Amino acid sequence: MRTLVWFRNDLRVDDNPALHHAMEHGEAIAAFCFCNAQWRDHDVGDNRLAFLLDNLHALAADLRELGVPLRTITEPWFDDLPDRLLNLAERVDADGISFNEEYPLNERVRDSKVTRAFEGAGRTVTVHHAGTVQPPGTVLTGEDEPYTVFTPFKKRWLSQIDNSHTAPLPRPDPQTRPDIDDSDLPEQTDGVPRDRVAQRWPAGAAEARRRLDDFADERIVRYHDDRDFPAVDGTSSLSPYLSVGSLSARQCLATAVENNGGKLSGGKEGIRTWIDELIWRDFYRHVIAQFPHVSRRQAFRREYDRVPWRNAPDELEAWKEGRTGYPLVDAAMRQLAKTGWMHNRLRMVTAMFLTKHLLIDWRQGERHFMEQLVDGDFAANNGGWQWSASTGTDAAPYFRIFNPHTQAKRFDPKGEFIRRMVPELAEAPDKAVFDPEGNATEGYPRPIVAHKHARQRALDTFKAAQSG
């Protein structure tokens, strides 16, 4: 049996159920589809496009070692993919198609159309789960309903974990290469060169594995203490690799459990805390899969679609460019602009500042992050923004409003990160770094809004929206 293996955000040969199944049952031919117009419509930015393409080149090399040719399709929108993929299957004489499921609504509609096209042509379709540890629909309440609060989701997730089903799959054995040519992979896509982020984020599953092992060997045991401090190298920085699938969540979990003496819960606090982050990742994917309205740019909690967000384009631009007059917010936004990545603590701080201090629609910020982030991931990005804006599942209550000055003092107590990213404050005294409202610094903007005023405005606005 010859199977077309359709790669998407699962650019690896290890722990890839679709590839593994195809090679267990016969020959595999790999396929990848460039859908630049659709991706841009989904706010995918240059950094992520470059990283995706660079990882596709790395995948092609790994596939060659397995004797699997890679063919590509270029089609601007999802709509024509069923015919294009079916045509490719006919040309390479494939009996069917195998792919790993994706969970956002447009992707699920696309996959349903591909399934109907192949089955209608008498070809097989096998769908697998590779983007989560436990697939959506498998972690449910006693009433068989999806969870909307993380803590009970986590308890059920942990209680039903089965190591025999969540262990990573091994790399398939090489096959005798079929007489089919590879596609020539481009060096750029939609005008974006593949090496745009390569220096900071080298591509490929081998690099992802190396980074995972380094984190597990050196930093994971301190993760609970170090993860909130942006001046410290305390996080895994694996999110770009998880986002394109050159590394799987199951590989991460297996490494964490191995380093925790075989324990999923208990054991070393740093490892246990990092496992919680993997469970959060599953949680947001379950939300996306089970509540389709979230994929339609709607608030998970419908009452917050009534919030009268402010139209303040100048303030939005000041936030994007790191000119708010709040040093920690500005340092974070400049980190994003410079590196295509932002520390997770700062993602919450900047998101809450936009939605609570400036009362600007969270969807504006969600879009900007997706356009900038090398690890742009719809489920995680949407979940994080709706948490910060108090519009989502298990979100921060609307009256929880971070004070950026307090956050700076707590998580950047020496001002190291701020001074590194905001050169205007490099030589400034601590007072100017932690209390810029009362300490003007030449060349650095005054605060765009007073914290006390902004907090009260947000409380009044959200309370009114909640009451209807």
Image (cartoon, rainbow, N blue to C red):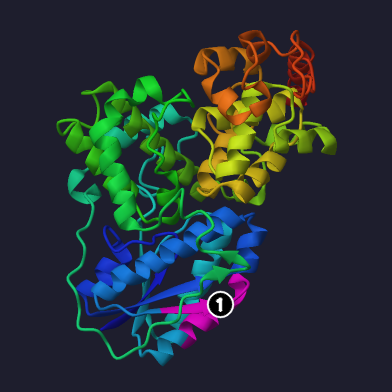
Above or below — where is 425 with respect to 111? above
**79 sits left or right of 374 in the view:** right
Q: Position of residue 449 (x, y in %)?
A: 79, 20
Q: In this rendered view, identify the residue nearer to me: 29 or 152.
A: 29
- Horizontally, residue 73 falls left or right of residue 167, namely right
Residues rendered magenta in the picture: 71-87
Q: Secondary structure at mark 1?
A: strand
Label 1 packing within 10 angstroms: few (<14), some (14-19), many (20+): few
Any part of residue 389 in sight: no
Q: Is residue 122 magenta?
A: no
Q: Which residue is mark 1?
A: 74
Query: Which quadrant: the N terminus?
Result: bottom left
Q: Is residue 87 left or right of residue 366?
A: left
Q: In the picture shown, does residue 7 fall above or below 264?
A: below
Residue drawn 64% across the image and 42% down it? 366
Q: To which quarter of the image does residue 196 belong?
A: bottom right
Write the residue at 78% across / 15% down.
Answer: 450
- The residue depicted at 70 percent of the width and 29 percent of the height is 355
Q: Position of residue 456 (x, y in %)?
A: 77, 13
Does the magenta portion include 82?
Answer: yes
Amino acid identity at mark 1: Thr
Residue 299, how many percent across, how many down? Answer: 66, 39
Position of 357 with respect to 139 (left or right) is: right
